[in-house]
Image (spheres, rainbow, N blue to C red):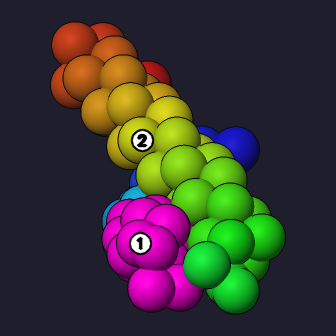
Amino acid sequence: MNTLIRDYPHIHLALGLIGNTLFLIGSVLFFKRFDAWYHIAVWLFVLGSAGMLIGAIGKAVTDIVNAREKRTGGE
């Protein structure tokens, strides 16, 4: 777990960015002009929200682990 947190922090950023992108596209598809795309918009909105949440949780865990290691001297 520590290897994932320490060596791959860009994964959390990528998940957040993908989530933000899906969220934005899904939000735009809710406009009246795109009524035919409603179900896809809903799923993009939900998946984007989940991606943003996972990215934020990963970032928070990374920050907590790094702060703890800094306090304890890297043990």
N-term-proximal mark, 2 vs 1:
1
- In the rendered structure, find residue 21 and report the number of the disc placed on it: none
Q: Residue at position x 58%, y 60% from top?
A: 45
Q: Mark 2 near mark 1, Cβ–Cβ under 8 Å?
A: no
Amino acid type at image mark 1: Phe
Counting from the top left corner in percent of width and height, residue 40 is at 73, 77
Counting from the top left corner in percent of width and height, residue 17 is at 37, 72
Q: Which residues are magenta?
A: 19-34
Find disc 2 in the rendering and name its residue.
Answer: 56
Q: Nearer the viewer, residue 41 or 33?
A: 33
Q: Tell me: residue 71, above or below residue 31.
A: above
- In the rendered structure, find residue 31 and report the number of the disc placed on it: 1
In which image quadrant can residue 14 be found? bottom left
Quarter placement of the C terminus? top left
Task: Report whether residue 56 is seen.
Answer: yes
Secondary element at tag 2: helix
Q: Nearer the viewer, residue 19 or 27?
A: 27
